């Protein structure tokens, strides 16, 4: 039976004053009989408990507790009293326990304090000794059974302090008697149960358990109860409520009013017959413990005198570093071990997750923080690598809320729209998420669609009909949601803000890169109609990258958001870390690092030097010592190294710390000013080094973060250079030009050894003078005959043209106005030549399939319903060719050999009519030079739009220079004088590259004779 009350408000009832006095006197002045306590009458034992509870309450109030209901709680289960105490600090907890111990007769009452680590147990014994409390320490698995027996018999009247390492030894003591069991920290559920079984043998009547919790555990109490007694009665005769029930109800009250209407315990908790496992989840990294002596050594020495151990908040921000995750929140957090520990998730969801084998045994790292936070009705953002479980961070709670909402949806014409919206990066991802949602929820109601997936434009009537009724989860893309929202009207509403409870952006980095404009519109609309905080709607954002432009707008409107970073390098973007890249020659690498350190004020800076392995660390240490630079090596995961690191973090004037990649994940806590990367192993290990900055994020704001990471890049480190430059571009940082040029020079040098004479010229090289692709299969050495543009290309001056197609914001397929338009075929302007080709090949007798096309051949292809000339640029396979339009556009297409027709001789010698115009300095902001689709659509619809009745507009441009097949122009102007360059710079993120002409001139100067 479980009784939930507050020790701070205990009252004595049911016994007269005289009886109570006699009971207390008997209790405190009993004989030294070792079994005295267990043979006392029920009245005496009850009075003793009440006395101890009242003393605990009074002492806590004396230490500054202003709200007993929040800091003290009691639960009774199977005649064992579980007391939960949340002190303000470790010091306060020790002071409180010392007073309790001194007020008890240790000859009668057996106190046992259990810790997780041996070092922690020794620390507790020392601290209690300073408070004049006698302790017996048992923290090593040696044969000390006789001492335990003497302690049990009362011959040793002291507090027994043990750790988890000796549990197996204590099980062998059949005579072990513990009256009061104290947990120094909150253990995990399986550890908690193991302790109870070992230290409190059955029967357990009259035993008391005290658990010291961090303040974060006070927000919600989660329990893993597989079965709860259906009708339990408390000792006072009133109906008792289980801890799991209270947790579920308390959590649900923080959700939406709709969810709160008829939330039953059966929906939140499975079965009956309790197996109590307290959800005592890990505390913040400063106070968490592990089985590693390295961690415990750091923990035991990392606290300054007077520092509060249980509170890691700095101001109003709380940060955590557990399970390889960096967490940031404005509220304290509780983590979990698996989904069964989250009481707000109902049995339907948990059973489905067990079938799917997701989070039932053990949650993934990012989910251990996310599940409890999201289940409490709060928003969350998770950033990390692929396949770490980001989608499943929010999916159980989203489906749980939809199950509850579906019970209250009405089909009387007043209710409509989805309860949740999940925005995906593409249809494939959306289909998978939709399948998971159906697996989790099942069919709750036959008269309602629980999952609606829309990934392509369907008729407006069908969309309106499906969404105008109450429905569950809408899964779509941001482009489709923008289109659907245009169908929403007051007379025919689709979206109901009163029932819309969850919104998820799944793959925000891909959405932002490909559909930034729809993302901005959708976000603005949603924040106008929804309120994202507890009791209202929830927002979930997950992705591979931290998108500063998006999250910068979202964060101020999410007061309860939890940020989770599995990628330490992405966390640096959130916290504004400064990155520096320095070039080093192979034989000067060590000298450059020494010079860098000598130029820094090492007495004022905390510097870490990271390298791959122990040989490099030893070599660096010797070099620094020879240069009179104090240094310390941390290259092991043992206790001595842990102590050394803890001492280093506590010194302001610390020496240079040299560490290796294997140890970096264990170095938690402490601020550093500079991280120098001695070498590069691989990208994941390189990124993991940035977790050393997690200590900075606790004490510094983004605006005041002056920490720096310095990377030395060798001239041949192409892979590292590309990845770093790609990272910088993805986060709107311009990489150094020297590193970008290094990539192209490396490719050219490789092609000198392995020529690609038979391959087409790289299009990026033609357009920008270099190539940044991660891998490129084209040629990067220019042949001498390719340096001269075609004779009919304009070389200078102004040109007038009609637009055939807007390929990208910077590239336009144009037809000069000197080539008069004869007519239009399917809204495409064609000249007299184009009309002749069309009419010629409309006759089946003139269509002769080209049997042996070669690179450079001019053929005819029916493309977009129009017969037109194309040039063969590449043979991919024996049956497939790359071709380029010559008259009706400039696009490249991959076509089958059977589609190519022989070009009649009378058409072969005519000049090509399509021109490739490019604005010289505009480039997309990524290494692959790919323009987002929404940016292309914006330019086509807003700048190159074709008004009704005027199918072909005239534009002008000033030629900058011509190269190969491209005409570079300074700008493009419409009839009203509006220029394209200003339009693009105003509306689209671009890289303004002013060195294109210089690089192309260099490429021309290095052209090779054709061979």
Image (cartoon, grey):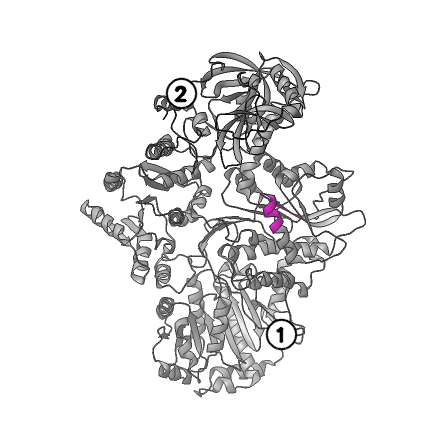
Q: Which residues are magenta?
A: 420-432
Gap in angstroms between the C-alphas marked 2 and 1? 86 Å
- Split into 4 quadrants, where in the image is the C terminus? top left
* Residue, far left: 626
Disc 2 is placed on an element classified as helix
Horizontal arrangement in the rendering, residue 931 relative to residue 234 (left or right): left
Q: Position of residue 397 (x, y in %)?
A: 61, 55
Q: Position of residue 713 (x, y in %)?
A: 32, 39
Q: Are marks 2 and 1 in contact (CB under 8 Å)?
A: no
Work out whether residue 260 or residue 429 is closer to the camera in this orientation and state it. Answer: 429
Disc 1 is placed on an element classified as loop
Residue visible at 44% across and 63% down in the picture: 92
Q: For mark 2, what is the residue?
A: 785
Asked whether residue 2 appears in the rendered view, the answer is yes
Q: Position of residue 815 (x, y in %)?
A: 57, 18
Horizontal arrangement in the rendering, residue 450 relative to residue 330 (left or right): right
Work out whether residue 373 or residue 735 is closer to the camera in this orientation and state it. Answer: 735
Asked if the magenta segment contains residue 775, the reply would be no
């Amino acid at each position: 039976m479980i009784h939930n009350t507050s020790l701070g408000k205990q009252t004595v009832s049911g016994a007269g004053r005289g009886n109570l006095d006699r009971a207390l006197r008997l209790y405190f002045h009993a004989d030294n009989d070792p079994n005295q306590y267990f043979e006392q009458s029920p009245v005496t034992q009850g009075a003793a408990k009440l006395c101890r509870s009242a003393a605990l309450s009074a002492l806590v109030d004396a230490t500054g507790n202003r709200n007993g209901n929040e800091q003290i709680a009691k639960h009774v289960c199977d005649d064992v009293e579980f007391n939960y105490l949340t002190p303000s600090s470790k010091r306060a907890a020790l002071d409180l326990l010392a007073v309790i111990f001194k007020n008890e007769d240790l000859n009668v009452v057996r106190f046992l304090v259990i810790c997780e680590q041996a070092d922690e147990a020794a620390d507790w014994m020392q601290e209690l000794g300073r408070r004049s409390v006698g302790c017996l320490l048992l923290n090593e698995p040696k044969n000390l059974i006789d001492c335990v027996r003497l302690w049990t018999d009362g011959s040793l009247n002291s507090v027994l302090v043990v750790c988890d390492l000796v549990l197996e030894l204590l099980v062998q003591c059949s005579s072990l008697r513990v009256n009061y069991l104290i947990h120094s920290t909150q253990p995990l559920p399986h550890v908690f149960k193991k302790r109870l079984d070992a230290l409190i043998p059955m029967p357990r009547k009259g035993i008391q358990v005290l658990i010291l919790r961090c303040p974060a555990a006070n927000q919600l109490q989660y329990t893993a109860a597989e079965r709860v007694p259906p009708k339990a009665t408390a000792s006072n005769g009133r109906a008792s409520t289980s801890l799991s029930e209270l947790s579920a109800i308390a959590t649900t009250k923080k959700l939406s009013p709709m969810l709160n209407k008829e939330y039953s315990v059966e929906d939140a908790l499975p079965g009956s017959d309790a197996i109590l496992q307290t959800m005592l989840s890990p505390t913040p990294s400063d106070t968490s413990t592990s089985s590693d002596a390295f961690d415990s050594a750091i923990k035991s020495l990392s606290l300054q005198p007077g520092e509060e151990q249980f509170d890691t908040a700095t101001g109003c921000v709380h940060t955590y570093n557990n399970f390889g995750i960096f967490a940031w929140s404005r509220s304290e957090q509780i983590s979990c071990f698996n989904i069964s520990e989250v009481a707000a998730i109902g049995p339907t969801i948990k059973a489905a997750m067990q079938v799917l084998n997701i989070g039932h045994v053990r949650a993934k790292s990012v989910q251990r923080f996310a599940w409890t936070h999201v289940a409490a009705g709060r928003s969350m953002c998770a950033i990390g690598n692929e396949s770490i479980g980001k989608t499943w961070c929010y999916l159980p709670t989203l489906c749980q809320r939809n199950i509850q909402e579906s019970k209250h949806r009405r089909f009387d014409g007043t209710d409509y729209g989805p309860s949740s919206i999940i925005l995906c990066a593409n249809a494939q991802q959306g289909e998978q998420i939709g399948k998971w949602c159906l697996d989790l929820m099942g069919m709750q109601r036959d008269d309602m669609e629980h999952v609606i997936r829309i990934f392509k434009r369907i008729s407006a009537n069908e969309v309106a009909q499906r969404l105008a009724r109450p429905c569950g989860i809408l899964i779509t893309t941001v482009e489709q949601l923008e289109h659907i929202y245009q169908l929403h009207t007051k007379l025919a509403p689709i979206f109901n803000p009163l029932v819309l409870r969850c919104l998820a952006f799944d793959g925000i980095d891909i959405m932002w890169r490909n559909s930034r404009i729809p993302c901005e519109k959708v976000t603005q609309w949603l924040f106008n109609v929804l309120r994202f905080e507890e009791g209202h709607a929830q927002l979930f954002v997950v992705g591979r990258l931290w998108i500063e432009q998006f999250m910068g707008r979202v964060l101020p409107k999410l007061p309860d958001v939890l940020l989770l970073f599995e990628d330490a390098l992405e966390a640096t973007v959130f916290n504004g870390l400064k990155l520096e890249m320095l070039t080093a020659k192979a034989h000067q690498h060590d000298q450059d690092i020494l010079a860098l350190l000598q130029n820094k004020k090492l007495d004022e800076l905390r510097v870490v030097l990271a390298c791959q392995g122990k040989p490099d660390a030893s070599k660096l240490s010797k070099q620094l010592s020879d240069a009179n630079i104090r240094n310390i090596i941390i290259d092991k995961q043992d206790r001595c190294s842990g102590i050394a690191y803890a001492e280093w973090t506590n010194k302001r004037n610390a020496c240079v710390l040299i560490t290796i990649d294997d140890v970096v994940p264990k170095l938690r806590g402490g601020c550093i000013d500079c991280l120098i990367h001695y070498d590069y192993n691989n990208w994941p290990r390189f990124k993991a080094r940035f977790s050393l900055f997690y200590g900075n994020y606790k004490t510094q704001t983004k605006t005041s973060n002056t920490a720096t990471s310095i990377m030395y890049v060798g001239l041949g480190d192409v892979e590292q250079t590309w990845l770093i430059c790609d990272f910088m571009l993805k986060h709107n940082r311009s990489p150094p030009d020297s590193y970008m040029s290094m990539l192209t020079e490396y490719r050219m040098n490789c092609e000198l050894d392995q020529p690609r004479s038979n391959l087409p010229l790289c299009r990026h090289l033609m357009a920008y003078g270099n190539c940044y692709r991660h891998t490129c299969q084209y040629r990067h050495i220019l042949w001498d005959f390719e340096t001269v543009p075609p004779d009919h290309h304009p070389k200078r001056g102004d040109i007038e043209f009609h637009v055939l197609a807007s390929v990208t914001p910077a590239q336009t397929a144009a037809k000069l106005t000197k080539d008069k338009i004869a007519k239009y075929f399917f809204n495409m302007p064609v000249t007299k030549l184009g009309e002749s080709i069309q009419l010629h090949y409309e006759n089946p007798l003139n269509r002769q399939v080209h049997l042996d096309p070669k690179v450079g051949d001019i053929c005819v292809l029916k493309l977009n319903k129009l017969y037109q000339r194309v040039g063969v640029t590449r043979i991919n396979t024996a049956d497939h060719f790359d071709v380029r339009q010559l008259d009706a556009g400039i696009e490249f297409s991959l076509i089958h050999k059977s589609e190519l027709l022989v070009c009649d001789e009378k058409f072969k010698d005519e000049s090509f009519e399509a021109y490739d115009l490019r604005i010289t300095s505009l480039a997309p902001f990524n290494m692959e030079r790919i323009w987002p689709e929404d940016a292309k659509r914006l330019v086509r619809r807003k700048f190159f739009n074709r008004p009704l009745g005027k199918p072909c507009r005239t534009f002008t441009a000033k030629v900058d220079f011509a190269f190969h097949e491209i005409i570079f122009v300074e700008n493009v102007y419409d009839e009203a004088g509006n220029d394209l360059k200003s339009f693009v710079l105003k509306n689209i993120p671009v890289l303004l590259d002013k060195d294109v002409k210089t690089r192309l001139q260099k490429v021309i100067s290095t052209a090779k004779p054709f061979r």
